[in-house]
């Protein structure tokens, strides 16, 4: 009995599977070889450049890195807390603004106008300028009840800036839901709000999950902007170390922390994107 007959598949299928395995191995080998060649050429070009010894001493000094590593690690925990707290407020603001903008009620026209102004203003204003205005402008008002903590001023600034971006992403997701989904909800006797909550919004959030996560990757990095209002986070610690040692290795160490924290979220975004494409294309 042949191998094909014993396994229950045809000889042609076995040949195709064997060809695909050979092709996959060949592609993997070519990818590894080309990657090694390109990265090796880049590394050689950088390390053989005339100014490399000075760059290595300024940016990649191992002794400086070991010295500043504990301080940057402790300060980076503040970046993580800022990211986690701001993310919650951003989602609340963004969902509220997105829903207000799609509700077809003429009575809400003034609120919808405010929502449009909010998204236009804060999407058009650089985040660093929002941080300046909130970080220094809000305490200068000296109004009772307004926060004076740098942590919460930073959270407010990030929420205002990123809330506008995320609101537009969510609004696009809501508008992408087919009208039959709305009609189905209303046919089941659900109100507009119940249809939005139970049928439309869950589908919209699932559809825009990849761009939402991309915004949160950017948010994670932009927590470093809060160093300009005096928060002692990872970038601020690197600045202090640079002023003391006249070297920039601390910045590289801080950058490594941001990269390590960003990679899992970026890969999760890629996974959701691929899964969404496969689901939409039925593969």
Image (cartoon, rainbow, N blue to C red):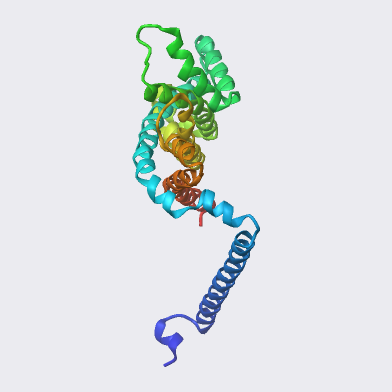
Q: Residue furthest front?
A: 245
Q: Residue 66: percent from the left, percent from the top?
A: 39, 51
Q: Is residue 146 above or below residue 42?
A: above
Q: Is residue 196 visible?
A: no
- Residue 51 is drawn in which quadrant? bottom right
Q: Is residue 19 visible?
A: yes
- Viewer-proximal residue, 236 or 138? 236
Q: Residue 260: percent from the left, percent from the top?
A: 43, 49
- Viewer-proximal residue, 262 or 279? 262
Residue occupying image coordinates x 60% and y 56%: 52
Q: Is residue 248 above or below residue 228?
A: below
Q: Is residue 18 above or below residue 137?
A: below
- Residue 92 is drawn in which quadrant? top left
Q: Residue 187: percent from the left, percent from the top?
A: 43, 28
What is the tally of numbered marks visible in this picture?
0
Q: Residue furthest bottom?
A: 1
Q: Residue 128: percent from the left, percent from the top?
A: 54, 27
Q: Is residue 39 above or below residue 248?
A: below
Q: Quadrant of the N terminus?
A: bottom left
């Amino acid at each position: 009995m042949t191998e094909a007959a014993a396994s229950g598949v045809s000889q042609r299928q076995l040949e195709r599977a064997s060809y695909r395995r050979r092709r996959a191995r060949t592609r993997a080998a070519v990818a590894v070889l080309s990657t090694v060649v390109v990265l090796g050429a880049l590394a050689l070009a950088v390390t053989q450049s005339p100014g490399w010894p000075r760059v290595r001493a300024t940016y990649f000094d191992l002794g400086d890195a070991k010295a500043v590593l504990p301080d940057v690690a402790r300060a980076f925990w503040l970046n993580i807390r800022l990211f986690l707290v701001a993310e919650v407020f951003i989602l609340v603001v963004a969902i509220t603004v997105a829903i207000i903008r799609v509700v077809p009620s003429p009575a809400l026209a003034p609120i919808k106008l405010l929502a449009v102004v909010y998204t236009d203003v804060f999407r058009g204003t650089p985040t660093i300028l929002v941080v300046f205005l909130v970080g220094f402008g809000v305490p200068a008002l000296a109004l009772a009840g307004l926060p004076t903590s740098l942590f919460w001023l930073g959270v407010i600034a990030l929420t205002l800036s990123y809330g506008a971006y995320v609101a537009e992403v969510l609004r696009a997701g809501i508008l992408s839901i087919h009208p039959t989904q709305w009609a189905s909800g209303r046919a089941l006797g659900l109100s507009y709000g119940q249809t939005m909550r139970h049928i439309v919004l869950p589908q919209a959030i699932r559809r825009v999950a990849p761009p939402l996560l991309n915004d949160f990757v950017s948010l994670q990095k932009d927590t470093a902007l809060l160093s300009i209002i005096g928060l002692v986070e990872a970038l601020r610690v690197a600045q202090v170390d640079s002023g003391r040692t006249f070297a920039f290795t601390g910045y590289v160490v801080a950058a490594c922390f941001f990269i390590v924290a960003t990679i899992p979220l970026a890969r999760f975004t890629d996974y959701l994107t691929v899964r969404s494409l496969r689901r939409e294309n039925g593969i």
